[in-house]
């Protein structure tokens, strides 16, 4: 199954673009959640406006669907400037970068999504633009080539990435404002769902909003997507009113369970529990067992399952945790009697605290 085929994918889908724009908050006060980020941005924006300067370059990172693009647009509105949006893979040549920068006006925002995917040559040309608002361009070829400096407007670069570890240090160090966006609480997501329902003219009871919010994996984009699907169900089956019961029935129909897991999440966990006695099981073996790519397991399924405490990633492979067994109403299998673990490795169900001082698993007495 492709990542974007999943209802609960945090990545943007084609159907999301128009509706996301409609639901996007316009001001920093309308933005729900991320309280510390909002508080800091308010101060930085007000200070920059009072000095008549461009805002420092800003980097927002974190999982997809948490509002990085929204914050970039809010900054532009709060600063009363224009915003130019692009993404890292789109800017392939230094000439394209110079064209974008020279067409900006003073204090404008340049928003680069997926900034970790910038071409290295383009990235290096961005350094002097960020620091000195100048571009170093090579004109001509061979012995006639010469370097010229091209001034750019004093702009603000806002970068967004889900993989901050892939950013080079020189690029990361040139951002004056760096914030990580965290997953949202169910309470904040409930407020977002209620606000979206008002904009979309959906009749929604508070309990119904909370039911949608708590199954949205801490992600506003998923919450808004689930709201639209439950709206469809309520329109056909429940006189257009989303109550707690209707939300529960609709989410069950969509195969989104109490913890926000979908079919693929449950299939992965149950495969580890049922076919591999809870693990550990190697990534290659697990990928073959569920007919999925290794990269998809690592990048798509595992992060949320690990965050929820349902999956553990160990040097010996993936393990289902006690919480995973409890989620499916099962008991972990007891360790088989007489099965001693090999030297320097813990037994199947042993933790590091059950090892002796030399790092060897204690042998059981017969």
Image (cartoon, rainbow, N blue to C red):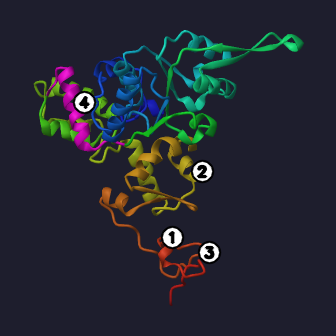
Q: Which residue is mark 4?
A: 227
- The numbered mark, 1 or 4, whose residue comes first in the sequence reads 4
Q: Is residue 214 above or below residue 175?
A: below
Mark 4 packing: few (<14 Cα in 10 Å), some, or many (20+)?
many
- The numbered mark, 4 or 3, whose residue comes first in the sequence reads 4
Q: Which residue is mark 2?
A: 284
Q: Which residue is mark 1?
A: 348
How far apart are the two marked residues, 3 and 2, measured between alpha carbons?
23 Å
In this rendering, position of residue 163 left or right of residue 261: right
Describe the element under mark 3 as helix, strand or loop. Answer: loop
- The numbered mark, 2 or 4, whose residue comes first in the sequence reads 4
Q: Main secondary structure of the magenta part?
A: helix
Say which mark, if any, is on residue 344: 3
- The numbered mark, 1 or 2, whose residue comes first in the sequence reads 2
Question: Where is residue 298 drawn, in percent x and y?
Answer: 52, 45
Q: Nearer the viewer, residue 11 or 175?
A: 175
Q: Is residue 34 above or below residue 57?
A: below
Instruction: Please state which of the two labelled residues, at mark 3 or mark 2, is closer to the viewer.
Output: 3
């Amino acid at each position: 199954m492709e990542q974007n085929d999943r209802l609960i994918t945090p990545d943007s889908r084609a159907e999301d673009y128009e509706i996301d724009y409609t639901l996007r908050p316009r001001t920093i006060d309308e933005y729900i959640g991320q309280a510390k980020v909002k508080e800091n941005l308010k101060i930085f924006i007000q200070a920059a406006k009072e000095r008549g300067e461009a805002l420092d370059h800003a980097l927002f990172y974190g999982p997809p669907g948490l509002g990085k693009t929204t914050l970039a647009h809010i900054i532009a509105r709060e600063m009363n400037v224009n915003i130019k949006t692009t993404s890292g893979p789109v800017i392939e040549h230094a000439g394209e970068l110079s064209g974008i920068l020279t067409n900006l006006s003073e204090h404008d925002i340049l928003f680069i999504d997926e900034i970790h995917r910038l071409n290295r040559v383009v990235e290096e040309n961005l350094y002097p633009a960020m620091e000195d608002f100048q571009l170093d361009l090579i004109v001509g070829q061979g012995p006639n080539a010469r370097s010229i400096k091209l001034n750019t407007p004093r702009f603000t670069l806002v970068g967004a990435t889900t993989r901050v570890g892939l950013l080079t240090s020189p690029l990361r160090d040139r951002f004056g404002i760096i914030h990580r966006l965290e997953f949202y609480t169910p309470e904040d997501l409930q407020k977002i769902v209620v606000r979206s329902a008002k904009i979309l003219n959906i009749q929604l009871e508070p309990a119904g909003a909370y039911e949608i919010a708590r199954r949205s994996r801490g992600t506003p984009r998923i919450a808004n997507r689930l709201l639209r699907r439950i709206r469809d169900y309520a329109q056909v089956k429940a006189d257009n009113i989303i109550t707690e019961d209707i939300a529960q029935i609709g989410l069950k129909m969509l195969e989104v369970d109490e913890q926000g897991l979908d079919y693929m999440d449950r299939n992965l966990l149950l495969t580890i529990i049922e076919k591999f006695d809870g693990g550990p099981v190697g990534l290659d073996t697990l990928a073959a067992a569920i007919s999925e790519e290794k990269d998809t397991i690592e990048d798509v399924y595992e992060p949320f399952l690990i965050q929820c405490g349902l999956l553990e990633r160990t040097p010996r492979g993936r393990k289902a945790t006690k919480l995973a067994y409890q989620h499916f109403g099962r008991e972990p299998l007891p360790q088989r009697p007489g099965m001693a673990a090999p030297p320097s490795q813990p037994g199947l169900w042993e933790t590091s605290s059950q090892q002796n001082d030399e790092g060897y698993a204690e042998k059981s007495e017969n």
